[in-house]
Amino acid sequence: MADKQVVYVDGSFVGKMDAKVSVFDHGLLYGDGVFEGIRAYNGRVFKLKEHIDRLFNAAKALSLQIPLSKAEMTEVVLESCRKNGIADGYIRLVVTRGFGDLGLSPLKCPKPSIICIAATIALYPPEFYDTGLKVITSTVRRNKATIIDPQVKSLNYLNNILARIEADRVGAPEALMLTEDGLVAECTGDNIFIIKGDEIWTPPIHMGILDGITRSTVIDLAGKNGFKVIEKEFTLFNVITADECFLTGTAAEIIAVTELDGKMIGDGKAGTVTNELLAIFQKYTKENGEDI
Ligand code: PMP
């Protein structure tokens, strides 16, 4: 697929090497744009409506008028999968502010650019799903919602990248980010859950986190399978004293965290609730989605 990969750019499918945007695109110059990371499983695009809705909401927050309807955008994603023979894969959908001048004002950018890349996915190595991740807490606080709301999945990911650099420096696969007040927010590309006794806790959206689609799916599936999920604020102390901890994200799905800042969580292996939820989630992903 790699050689023949075609990428959607502004209405046409072009070869990978010809898929380009202008150096005057404000997505490049200022991180001015929005994006989605979407999964395809078993010939279907998972939670496509939710991803398209989130993209349009993020664009609205930036006063960015997407030049396609939601139905047309849906078709762009499905056609990108078809053209690249993707039945299981990862789709990156991007809307940039488009070509402009060197000033900041979006008024000089008459037409947003739309890019859709359908590719295969590089997952965490399978053994990580048994051993869990050894995560660090970043010194970089998650953006406050009053500055750039983390609900806006924008092309400006520097907040997360700064945290990720700290993780990379010590060889950790993810970094946990806190709010300005020191409460647990989310990781650089994943939401977080902890399990204590018969309760599953996850931070509420209003704390300043991305409204993760995997997070919502897990809350829904856990509830339907008899688990008690509570959206509440909690601290690092609650994480290290939890029975289990796991992260959720489109790429990672559900993955255990077994160590935080050198402190073991639970018995240091992926826990039984985490494994049970992963099995429920994986079954669900194989059976649900928009047909390609
Ligand atoms: N938080 C952040 C900061 C993210 O970038 C992502 C997506 N990679 C998530 C959480 C998980 O969201 P989703 O389940 O919708 O992929």
Image (cartoon, rainbow, N blue to C red):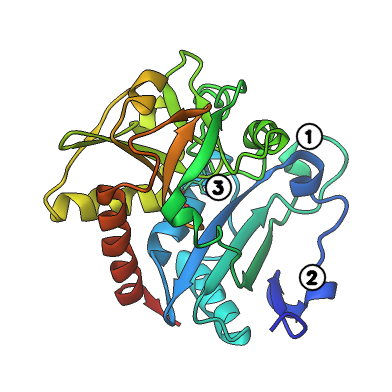
Tell me the amino acid under the disc marked 2.
Answer: Ala
Q: Which residue is mark 1?
A: 104
Nearer the N terminus, badge 2 or badge 1? Answer: 2
Q: In the image, what residue occupies the spot 59% across and 26% down?
A: 138
Nearer the N terminus, badge 1 or badge 3? Answer: 3
Residue 118 in picture, x, y percent from top left: 61, 72
Residue 81 in picture, x, y percent from top left: 56, 79
Residue 221 in picture, x, y percent from top left: 22, 56
Left or right relative to 165: residue 93: left
Which label was assigned to residue 270? Answer: none
Q: Secondary structure at mark 1?
A: loop
Whole-number angstrom distance, CA of label 2 to CA of label 3: 22 Å
Q: In the image, what residue occupies the spot 76% across and 36% down?
A: 105
Q: Which residue is mark 3?
A: 59
Q: Which residue is mark 2?
A: 19
Tell me the amino acid under the disc marked 1.
Answer: Leu
Which corner quadrant holds the N terminus?
bottom right
Residue 166 in picture, x, y percent from top left: 68, 30
Whole-number angstrom distance, CA of label 1 to CA of label 3: 17 Å
Task: Say if mark 1 contacts mark 3, CB within 8 Å.
Answer: no
